[in-house]
Amino acid sequence: MHMKLQEAIDEAFDQALHELAACRSAEALIWLERAHILTQRRPWLHARSHWLMLRAGWQQGDMREVLGQVPRILAALLFSRIWVPVGNTGRARVSAFQPMPVTEDLQALLASERQQRVPEA
């Protein structure tokens, strides 16, 4: 994995865990949305982002978020390598099938990884 992408993923998860530990679940969810977009093609990390969203929803007492994350965890494990809606933030308040715009900073991180995977002619 591209080093900058890995660092961004690590930072997003670390910050989210820090916010969850401080009972700031709304702030944690912002970091988890970022982690979700960056890890959509990695089943275990993708599922981890959904698991932590479930925890944040539980912390907030948001049963819609909690219940919405359960099928997303399973789908992340089963379908991440086949198809994902690019840019989808992973939250229960949006359709799990809806592609969404990706910010420029995340586009750059994801593009650098795609370039690394494409063999040069």
Image (tube, helix red, strand yellow):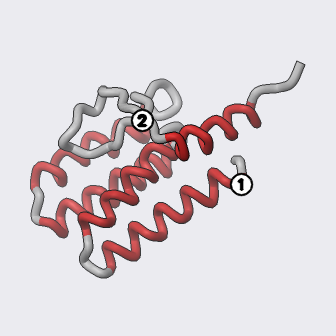
Q: Residues within 10 Å of mark 2 (few under 14, many from 20)?
A: many
Amino acid at dot 1: Met
**Residue pictured at 25% horizontal, 68% vertical:** 25
Residue marked by disc 1: 3
Give the x, y percent position of residue 62: 11, 58
Looking at this view, is 69 or 87 the one in front?
87
Looking at this view, name the residue that lies furthest to the top.
121
Looking at this view, is 114 or 44 the one in front?
114
Give the x, y percent position of residue 16: 39, 67
- Horizontal side of 25 relative to 111 (left or right) equals left
Pointers 2 and 1 in contact (C-beta within 8 Å): no
Looking at this view, is 7 or 58 the one in front?
7
Element class at badge 2: loop
Depicted 60 relative to depicted 88: above or below: below
Looking at this view, name the residue that lies furthest to the right.
121
Q: Quadrant of residue 121?
A: top right
Give the x, y percent position of residue 105: 55, 46
- Horizontal side of 90 relative to 58 (left or right) equals right
Give the x, y percent position of residue 6: 63, 55
Residue marked by disc 2: 87
